[in-house]
Each structure stands twice: as structure tokens, then as C-alpha cells.
Image (cartoon, rainbow, N blue to C red):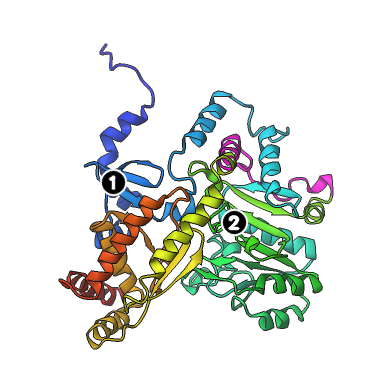
């Protein structure tokens, strides 16, 4: 009988044998539009390894990550402290998720999180940002006995059905009705908030202190005044810090930029994972948790099968430890100020560049209608086909020519959003600004290759109508 050698699962061998099939496998078995989109815009790279704010392709070319996995990679990729914590927790062979005991790691992570949220008392751990929001919506409804949640136009709070009900963008909501009967107001519109609260059925307002779509911050004083109005009407303030939390904006939470703001519920996720293990957390006041979990009969009224698992808790503890030891929040503030300052200096230089905004390392670069006749005609061509194509024209050469990964901030927006790992340094800032300047130079003159690509995008946009 032939001996075929040792049996068992070998991940390295599997990747060596099948890794080159990645795009074909995705096309056949997963979301087939993703590889199609990546092929179309030339983003179909094959990345082999990553570390910190950089990754490398098979040829050894270095890429700068200004996207951080949509904010997940707050500490960059493969931070050694987080890696070691995960090795350690696996080697410990803990009796995890027995469901009928109390393991130490969840309590330790909750304790550490609450140090940064001294007005809050308790934590629920789930598995994602949308799950953290779902928890907050349920808790707010039950604690207040009211059905309706207010949210802001253009908000993004997740894509599960409850979170989708407070998603301010129709493109995500279309075709998934019926949703929960919640109500949108404009970010910063206190009069609209006041009108809705007078109806007496509002449980809470859920708000991103800085909206991910377009990178729009709540106007100064809005969160504090909204909180006062909500509490006067016995409703709650929910801060969605899934993307803005854990140092992204130069404070631990973005709501902390405004004195006196103390949300009743706070949602975090993304960067708490260390980029490894999905995790979501909903922090809240003691009375809310006591009302939801009001008796032993209700002990499992809200739970998550993988919530509080040891690997996620270990990753979260390691992330918070690194942030303290490396003073990540202060570093994000300094580097963000440097990057925004360098970019703001370009606004008067390029007529297509209209505004640079944001806080910390959450930055929006907005483009707009130019003044010169030649550029206006080209701009009009793009806008007639589909709004947002110029921003895409900038994102593509940043990757293809300069090996820098960025994203357009939302559908039909002429805004690029920068949410790099919080560990980028001055050299990375220099690299990005130099590349962005070169792309802007091309857009305002030069060879016209960018505009040739723009015409390609126009054809694709028209074909997709």
C-alpha cells in the first residue's frame, strides 16, 4: 500500500498551491462584483505580506496604506504585542465560551475600556460594529420604553437590518424594506431634533461625532445641546465611535472634543480588534443595563454566541496596552495635524481642490468645480456621467503610480477619505503629500493621461446605467 505521507491540514501548503487562484475563487464563490470592480480600476494587486502601515506585493514593491482596512488596522498590521497576546491565549488552552462561568478576560477588558469612559459603567461584547449598534438600539428602546430612534442624514451605522434602519444613505437601504420606523434629521439641526422629541416617542439619537461619509464633523456645540434636549425629554444619546473611537481623531473618543458630552451609550469596534479578531463593544450606564437585565429570567435576553471570546478579549487588552505604552492617541493627533496642515497648504494652489477637513487621522479631501474654462469642461463631462468620478481619478493613480491605497469617501461624493493606521510617521506623510501633489499636477495640466482615464470611467458609468 502506497504511503502518501503525513495527513492533516497544512495552511502554508494550501496557500502555496491555491493562492494564485484568489480572484477566480472570489468570482466563483463570493461577491462576484468585487473582483470585477478591482479589475476595472486596476486595483487587482496581489499582496504577499504586511507590517505596520505598509504591505508588499510579490515583486517586493512597498505600498503605503492610508485606508487601514476601513479603520480596523488602528495599530497597523501585525503589531508584535497583539500577535504575542494571541499566541499566548491560544497556548493557554482556556476553558473558553462554556456559557456557564465567568472568565477573567472579558471583565479585565471591560474595566480597561471604562477607564477611558469614566461616566459609563458596563460593557456588552459582541462581534462587530453593526452588532454594537444593534445592541445600543435595543437597549435604548427597552430602557426608555419608546420605539423610535433618530439618526442623521448620510450616517453609516452598519448593514444589519436594525442598523440599516438608522443608515442615512438610500443606496444601502434600497430593496431591503421594511425597516424599523426611525427618522432622519440633518447633522447639527437642533430644531429638527426638538420637533421630533416633542412627539414623545423617541428613545434615542444615534450619531457619529464625525461622519464617515464625507468626513463631516458635528457642528461645535451640537452634541452637548442635543444631549441636553434628549435628557430633558427622557431620551438617550448614543455615540457611534466604531470608526472614530480609540484615538482615530486625536482623542480616545471623538465626542471628547466637546466639553460636557457624556453619551448614555457608546459603540466601539474596528481598531479594538488589533486587526485580528472581530469584536464590538457597547458601553453604557448602569441603570440601562439593570433595566435590560432586570431579573434572572432575562439573563440571556441579549447575548452573542462568540461575544467575549478569549481571543477577542486578548486582542482588545493588547491593543489598549499598546495605545498606552506608545502614546498612540497623542501621536495620531500630532501626525494628523501635520498631514492636514500640509494638505491645506495645497488648497490655494489647485483649483480642483476645494477643502481639507477632519480631526486627527480622519481626514477628508474634497474636490469641486474648477474656475478655468478648460478644466470646467472636463469636470462637467465627469459630473454628467456620475458624480464621484474625479475622486476616483485621483485614487487610481495614487495606487497605480505611487503605490498608496486610499478610498473615495462614499458613493456620488467627490471626497477622498484618509484613515491610515495611527502608527504612520512623518516619512509616510511626506510620501503621501508628494504623491498627491504629483497627481494634482497631472490633473491640472501635463500629459492628460488622468483625463484619458476619466473618459474610460465615463464610458463605464454610462454603460452601467
- For the residue carrying disc 2, how many other residues have a C-alpha within 10 Å: few (<14), some (14-19), or many (20+)? many
Q: Is residue 73 left or right of residue 279?
A: left
Query: Can residue 409 be seen in this snapshot?
Result: yes
Q: Is residue 9 above or below residue 158?
A: above
User: What residue is drawn where x is 31% and y is 47%?
Assistant: 25
User: What residue is drawn where x is 51% and y is 43%?
Assistant: 274
**Which residue lies most toward the right here?**
295
The residue that mark 2 highlights is: 251
Which label's residue is closer to the chain start, 2 or 1?
1
Give the x, y percent position of residue 143. Answer: 78, 61
- Look at the numbered discs 2 and 1 and tell me whether their residues touch, using CB distance below 8 Å: no
- Secondary structure beneath label 1: strand
**Which residue lies most toward the bottom here?**
373
For the residues carrying marks 2 and 1, which lies nearer the camera in this image?
2
- Residue 358 counted in the magenta span: no
Q: CA distance from mark 2 to mark 1?
A: 30 Å
Give the x, y percent position of residue 29. Answer: 35, 49
User: What residue is drawn where x is 46% and y is 64%?
Assistant: 363
Q: Which residues are magenta?
A: 295-320
Q: Quadrant of residue 465?
A: bottom left
Q: Is residue 80 left or right of residue 208?
A: left
Query: Can residue 278 be seen in this snapshot?
Result: no
- Secondary structure beneath label 2: loop
For residue 414, the mark is: none
Give the x, y percent position of residue 73. Answer: 47, 48
Q: Nearer the viewer, residue 356 or 262?
A: 356
- For the residue carrying disc 1, how many other residues have a C-alpha within 10 Å: few (<14), some (14-19), or many (20+)? some
Give the x, y percent position of residue 236. Answer: 74, 66
* Image quadrant in which the N terminus is located: top left
**Which residue lies most toward the top here?**
1
Q: Nearer the viewer, residue 353 or 318?
A: 353
The residue that mark 1 highlights is: 62
Amino acid at each position: 500500500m502506497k504511503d502518501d505521507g503525513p495527513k492533516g491540514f497544512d495552511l502554508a501548503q494550501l496557500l502555496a498551491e491555491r493562492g494564485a487562484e484568489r480572484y477566480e475563487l472570489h468570482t466563483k464563490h463570493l461577491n462576484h462584483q468585487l473582483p470585477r470592480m478591482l479589475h476595472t480600476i486596476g486595483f487587482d494587486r496581489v499582496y504577499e505580506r504586511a507590517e505596520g502601515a505598509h504591505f508588499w506585493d510579490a515583486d517586493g514593491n512597498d505600498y503605503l496604506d492610508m485606508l487601514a482596512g476601513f479603520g480596523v488596522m488602528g495599530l497597523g498590521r501585525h503589531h508584535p504585542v497583539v500577535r504575542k497576546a494571541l499566541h499566548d491565549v491560544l497556548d493557554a488552552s482556556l476553558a473558553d465560551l462554556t456559557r456557564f462561568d465567568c472568565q477573567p478576560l472579558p471583565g479585565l477588558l471591560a474595566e480597561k475600556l471604562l477607564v477611558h469612559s469614566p461616566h459609563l459603567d458596563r460593557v456588552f461584547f459582541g462581534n462587530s460594529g453593526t452588532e454594537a449598534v444593534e445592541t445600543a438600539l435595543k437597549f435604548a428602546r427597552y430602557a426608555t420604553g419608546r420605539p423610535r430612534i433618530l439618526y442623521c442624514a448620510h450616517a453609516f451605522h452598519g448593514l444589519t437590518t436594525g442598523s440599516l434602519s438608522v443608515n442615512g444613505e438610500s443606496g444601502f437601504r434600497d430593496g431591503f424594506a421594511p425597516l424599523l420606523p426611525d427618522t432622519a434629521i440633518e447633522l447639527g439641526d437642533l430644531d429638527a431634533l426638538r420637533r421630533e422629541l416633542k412627539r414623545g416617542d423617541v428613545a434615542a439619537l444615534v450619531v457619529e461625532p464625525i461622519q464617515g461619509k464625507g468626513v463631516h464633523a458635528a457642528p461645535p456645540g451640537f452634541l452637548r445641546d442635543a444631549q441636553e434636549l434628549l435628557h430633558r425629554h427622557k431620551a438617550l444619546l448614543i455615540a457611534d465611535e466604531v470608526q472614530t473611537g480609540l484615538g482615530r481623531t486625536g482623542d480616545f473618543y471623538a465626542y471628547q472634543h466637546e466639553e460636557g458630552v457624556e453619551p448614555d451609550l457608546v459603540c466601539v469596534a474596528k481598531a479594538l480588534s488589533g486587526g485580528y479578531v472581530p469584536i464590538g463593544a457597547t458601553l453604557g450606564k448602569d441603570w440601562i443595563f439593570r433595566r435590560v437585565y432586570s431579573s434572572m429570567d432575562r439573563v440571556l435576553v441579549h447575548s452573542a454566541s462568540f461575544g467575549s471570546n478569549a481571543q477577542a478579549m486578548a486582542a482588545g487588552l493588547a491593543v489598549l496596552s499598546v495605545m498606552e505604552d506608545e502614546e498612540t492617541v497623542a501621536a495620531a493627533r500630532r501626525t494628523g495635524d501635520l498631514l492636514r496642515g500640509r494638505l491645506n497648504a495645497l488648497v490655494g494652489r489647485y483649483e480642483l481642490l476645494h477643502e481639507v477637513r477632519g480631526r486627527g487621522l480622519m481626514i477628508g479631501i474634497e474636490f469641486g468645480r474648477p474656475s478655468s474654462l478648460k478644466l470646467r469642461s472636463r469636470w462637467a463631462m465627469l459630473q454628467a456621467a456620475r458624480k464621484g468620478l474625479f475622486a476616483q481619478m485621483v485614487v487610481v493613480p495614487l495606487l497605480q503610480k505611487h503605490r498608496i491605497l486610499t478610498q473615495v469617501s462614499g458613493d456620488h461624493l467627490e471626497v477622498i477619505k484618509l484613515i491610515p493606521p495611527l502608527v504612520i510617521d512623518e516619512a509616510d506623510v511626506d510620501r503621501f503629500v508628494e504623491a498627491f501633489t504629483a497627481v494634482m499636477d497631472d490633473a491640472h495640466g501635463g500629459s492628460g493621461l488622468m483625463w484619458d482615464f476619466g473618459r474610460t470611467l465615463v464610458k463605464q458609468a454610462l454603460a452601467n446605467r
